[in-house]
Image (spheres, rainbow, N blue to C red):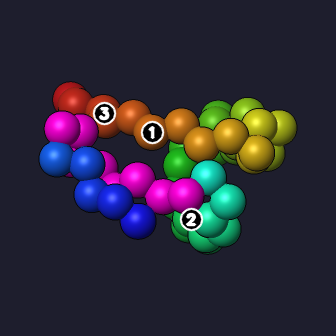
Amino acid sequence: MIWSKDSGMLVLNPDTQFLVIIRVPTVFVPDILTYQQYLYLAKVAT
């Protein structure tokens, strides 16, 4: 594990397994189930 000062994010080894539990609007569930092998990070500002 490495903390990236440039991005402010934690960088993990690509082989690291982890569980992420999130709450999302129903409209996104089909895409999440279809593309569950990918991880997308986003910052949403309103």
Residue at the disc numbered 2:
20
Identify the mark nearer the N-term, 2 or 1: 2
The residue closer to the viewer here, 16 or 35, is: 16
What amino acid is at disc 1? Leu
From the top left corner, tell me how far across and down residue 40 is, in percent. 54, 37
From the top left corner, tell me how far across and down residue 43 is, in percent. 31, 35
Q: How crowded is mark 1: few (under 14 residues within 10 Å), some or many (20 or more)?
A: few
Residue drawn 40% across the image and 53% down it: 11
Residue at the disc numbered 3:
44
Q: Is residue 11 located in the magenta-colored stretch of the structure?
A: yes
What amino acid is at disc 2? Val
Per the model, the C-alpha gap separating discs 3 and 2 is 18 Å
User: For residue 38, what is the image quadrant?
Assistant: top right
In the image, residue 18 above or below residue 5: below
Disc 2 to disc 1: CB gap under 8 Å: no
From the top left corner, tell me how far across and down residue 45 is, in percent. 22, 31
Residue drawn 21% across the image and 29% down it: 46
